[in-house]
Image (tube, rainbow, N blue to C red):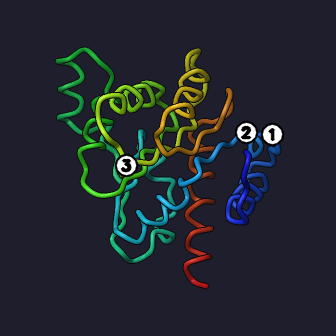
């Protein structure tokens, strides 16, 4: 990264400690305004929207502050399931549409579904998304490396685990490290 703040360095150091993987922390990209966006989300009672209930359940809610910020996951919502079947697209794509419809600042967290990353990139091409930040840490699928690079190249505010690294446990670790750093600095 051409820039590195003390906050970013602290977050990356914690991720490295938690995962015992120096190459992981070196592969994480932060948009210049990503941390500012997440801080604003916490302050304004915004929403973290996850692509799996595993990520949703792994977030340390004690780090969310007391301003009303919340975490939601639409992947198992009956309407999402029904619309995905009707339209013959993935639940992740419909869940992104539901997430983007949530008012206020939001962090779209993708630890599993590359289709969710693709959907956000495609939606951004036709509509403004100034109140959206994306944390993308998917792994495993052939197109995921390219999708994460396309996300970096887009103008969406993002935090991206580059390359093939990532997955649900990594996503949870990254998000909790970010929230912990924000909470620590808010108490200063």
Q: Whole-percent x and y of residue 168?
A: 56, 40
User: Residue visible at 46% across and 29% down?
Assistant: 113
Q: Whole-percent x and y of residue 149?
A: 59, 27
Residue that lies at the very extreme toward the bottom in this rendered image: 188
Q: Whole-percent x and y of residue 167?
A: 59, 36
- What whole-number distance in Å separates the C-alpha atoms at marks 3 and 1? 31 Å
- Mark 2 is surrounded, within 10 Å at the Cα level, by few (under 14), some (14 to 19) or many (20 or more) other residues, namely some
Q: Is residue 109 above or below residue 11?
A: above
Disc 2 marks which residue?
27
Disc 3 marks which residue?
130
Q: Is residue 179 left or right of residue 96?
A: right
Element marked by disc 3: loop
Instruction: Decide which of 56, 95 is in the foreground and name it.
Output: 95
Disc 1 marks which residue?
23
Circle 2/circle 1 CB separation < 8 Å: yes
Q: Is residue 13 left or right of residue 49?
A: right
Element marked by disc 1: helix
């Amino acid at each position: 990264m051409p820039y590195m703040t003390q906050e970013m360095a602290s977050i990356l150091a914690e991720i490295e400690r938690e995962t015992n993987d120096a190459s992981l922390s070196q592969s994480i990209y932060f948009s210049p305004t990503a941390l500012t966006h997440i801080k604003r989300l916490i302050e304004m009672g915004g929403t973290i929207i996850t692509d799996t209930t595993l990520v949703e359940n792994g977030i340390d809610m004690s780090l969310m502050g007391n301003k009303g910020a919340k975490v939601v996951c639409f992947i198992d919502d009956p309407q999402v399931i029904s619309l995905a079947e009707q339209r013959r697209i993935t639940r992740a794509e419909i869940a992104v549409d539901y997430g983007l419809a949530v008012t206020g600042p939001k962090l779209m967290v993708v630890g599993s579904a590359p289709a969710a990353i693709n959907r956000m990139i495609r939606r951004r091409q036709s509509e403004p998304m100034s109140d959206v930040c994306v944390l993308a840490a998917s792994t495993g699928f052939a197109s995921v490396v390219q999708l994460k690079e396309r996300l970096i190249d887009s103008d969406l505010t993002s935090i991206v685990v580059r390359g093939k690294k990532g997955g649900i446990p990594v996503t949870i670790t990254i998000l909790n490290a970010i929230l912990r750093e924000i909470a620590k600095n808010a108490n200063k």
